[in-house]
Image (spheres, rainbow, N blue to C red):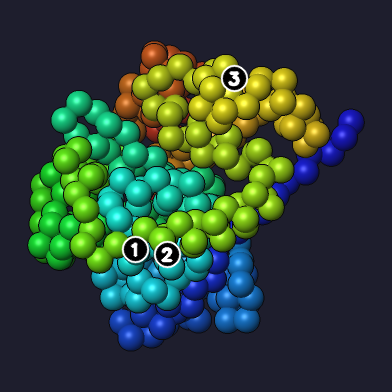
Amino acid sequence: MTPVVMVLPLAHTASLQQFERYARIAGIDLDAILSDEHNAVLAEARTSEVVSAQAIVDIFQIAAIASRRSDLGVGFAMWCNLHGYGPLSLLWDHCTSVDQLLRLGGRYLHLETEAIGSSALIEGEEVAVQQFLTVPTLLGGSQYLETTLTLQLRTIRLILGQQWHPLRIEFSHPAPDQLGFHRSVFRCPLVFGADRTALILPPDDLTRENPNGNAHLTAYLERQLETVRASRSDDVLRPLERFITAHLAGGSMTLERACAGLGIGARTLQRALAARAMTFSDVLGAVRRRIADDYFAYQRKPNLSELAHRLGYTEASAASRFLRENFQAGARTLSRQTRAQRRAS
């Protein structure tokens, strides 16, 4: 049998470099709280362009837990330099509308980080700008998601003005004990324990013109990003994982639906996966395991019906079977194990 070829998801080191400086200012001793492995990633980030995307997510989460700062991700995102990120940040000042910002972000976000994906869905009188993890995590990824969602808020405010605020913010993780800082930053209703992590805005905001936008410069920068993206286009696994993650909850995920969403034929996708000794079912199962891991990282009282919805099942019994087949344990046992791991860390 041909061995499965695993590709390590990567992220630009700019965010980690900024986070290390922020932690120092905030009085968080990363050297003391991180493992040798994660400290090695910090050291690598000082000289390399990319490092493990999963390691960055874990470092954010560990730092928040150790410092007891449930608002660490939001605080960092409000402190950081928007221009101090990777290639995608060059676009943020120049987009002519929020619609263009979201389109380019969805297309090129993976050049910045392969730890998350993003999608914008029109839902009646609302637009949901969703962000979701695409890597497994050690202790969950709420801090990294809160960071990226806050950065999304700041980039939209570059276009719509600093007084702009969303209709609401939805978070898939439970609410922290203190919400004062979150409320002061987002200035809108906050919903925790939702099916997704998303920023909700009215459709009219998509097309409002940015008075400082530069269509010619944006087009030039997009061509440069497209050149980089095209050079990586032979890897179909990451786009497939992102699509499944974005559209799995509450719906029927099939090979045909994924192919339609990615704009490729079923045979082309199957051949690409076969070259990695993988099938569509393998990828679907891996995404479901990652979502289940993240769910149990937060939920003190797991709800099988809720988990089933997130995993794309219609019945709670299907989620229960999935857990026993993939984790050899039920929901309560997995919840206890995750809490014990969290305390040990």
Residue highlighted by disc 2: 217
- The amino acid type of the residue labelled 3 equals Leu
**Quick one: 338 or 42, which is closer to the camera?**
42
- The amino acid type of the residue labelled 2 equals Leu
Q: How far apart in space, not on screen, are marks 3 and 1 (Cα)?
A: 40 Å
* Numbered circle sitting on residue 214: 1
The x, y position of residue 232, in whole percent, is 67, 50
Binning the other alpha carbons within 10 Å of mark 2 as few (below 14), some (14 to 19) or many (20 upward) gives some
- Residue contact between numbered discs 2 and 1, judged by CB atoms under 8 Å: yes
Q: Secondary structure at mark 2?
A: helix
The x, y position of residue 86, in whole percent, is 50, 68
Q: Quadrant of the N terminus?
A: top right
Do we see residue 108 in this rendering?
A: yes
* Image-based side of 106 in relation to 176, left or right: right
Q: Which-is-in-front pick, marks 3 and 1?
A: 1
User: Vertically, is 60 above or below 8?
Assistant: below
Binning the other alpha carbons within 10 Å of mark 3 as few (below 14), some (14 to 19) or many (20 upward) gives some
How many numbered discs, if any?
A: 3
Question: Is tag 3's residue or tag 1's residue first in the polypeptide sequence?
Answer: 1
List the single residue furthest toward the front. Answer: 216
* Numbered circle sitting on residue 255: 3
Binning the other alpha carbons within 10 Å of mark 1 as few (below 14), some (14 to 19) or many (20 upward) gives some
**Quick one: 176 or 142, which is closer to the camera?**
142
- The amino acid type of the residue labelled 1 equals Asn
**Quick one: 204 or 157, which is closer to the camera?**
204
Image quadrant where residue 262 sits: top right
Q: How far apart in space, not on screen, are marks 2 and 3 (Cα)?
A: 38 Å
The x, y position of residue 144, in whole percent, is 39, 58
* Numbered circle sitting on residue 1: none
Q: How far apart in space, not on screen, are marks 2 and 1 (Cα)?
A: 5 Å
Residue at image location 62% in from the left, 55% down from the top: 227
